[in-house]
Image (tube, rainbow, N blue to C red):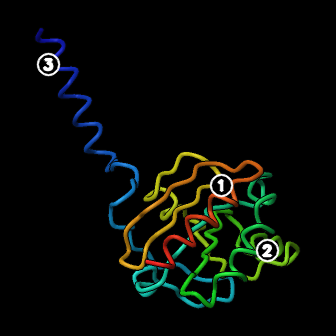
Amino acid sequence: MRNLILALMLAAGTFAATGARAAVTPQTAAPDFTLKTAEGRNLRLQEQRGQVVLINFWASWCGPCLQEMPHLNRLHERYASSGFRLLGVNVDDNPRLAAQVAQRLGVKFTVLLDTDKAVVKRYDLGSMPGTVLIDRDGRVRYLHRGYRDGMEADYERQIRELVKE
C-alpha cells in the first residue's frame, strides 16, 4: 500500500512538473495566442472574437495536410464574407519552407507560424492535421483530428451552422 501511495505521489508530481494540461475540448474557451503571419504581422486569436474561426494546424511534411489545403481554400473563399476566418497554423521549424509550400498550393487564407510549437502544444490535438472550429464567442465547438477524403463536408456543415448563430 505504501508503494502504491508513493507511486501515485510521484506520478502527480511528474504531471505537475511538466505543466501538462487537459487537451482542448468542445465548449471550453479557445486558448488565446499571438503568432506572426507569414507576412510578418502579429495576429492574436482574441482579436478575432465576433467571427467564426477555423484553426487548422498543418506542416509541409504532412501529406494529409497538403491534401486538404485546396478544400480549406474553397471554404475560406466561400464563407469569408459571412464572418468566417480561417487560420492555418504551420508548425514547421523553417518559416520560409512554410511560406513556399503555402504559395505553391495557392493558399489564400492567413498562414501563422508556430516554429516553437507553443500553440500546437496548448491545443494538444495529438494528430496532424488538427482542426478546431471556434464560435463567435471564442468557444471551441468542434475538433477534428487528422484528415480523410470527405471531411470538408463536415467542416462546411459546421461552419454554416456557426455563421448562422
Q: Secondary structure at mark 1?
A: loop
Q: Amino acid at mark 3?
A: Ile
First in sequence: mark 2 vs mark 3: 3
Q: Residue at x 42, y 86 (%)?
A: 50
Along the line of sight, the residue nearer the viewer: 147 or 159: 159
Label 2 with label 3: CB-CB less than 8 Å? no
Q: Which residue is mark 2?
A: 102
Give the foreground label among 2 and 3.
2
Quarter of the image with the C terminus is bottom left
- What numbered label is drawn on residue 129? 1
Q: In the orientation shown, which residue stands out farthest toward the right?
A: 104
5 left or right, relative to 127? left
Q: Position of residue 25 (x, y in %)?
A: 39, 53
State how far apart marks 1 and 3 are (Cα).
39 Å
Label 2 with label 1: CB-CB less than 8 Å? no
13 left or right, relative to 120? left
State how far apart marks 2 and 3 are (Cα).
51 Å
- Badge 1 local density, few (<14 within 10 Å), some, or many (20+)? many
53 left or right, relative to 93? left
Q: Residue at x 49, y 73 (%)?
A: 162
Q: Position of residue 85 (x, y in %)?
A: 57, 81
Q: Which residue is mark 3?
A: 5
- Badge 2 local density, few (<14 within 10 Å), some, or many (20+)? many
Q: Residue at x 52, y 85 (%)?
A: 43
Q: Amino acid at mark 2?
A: Ala
Give the foreground label among 1 and 3.
1
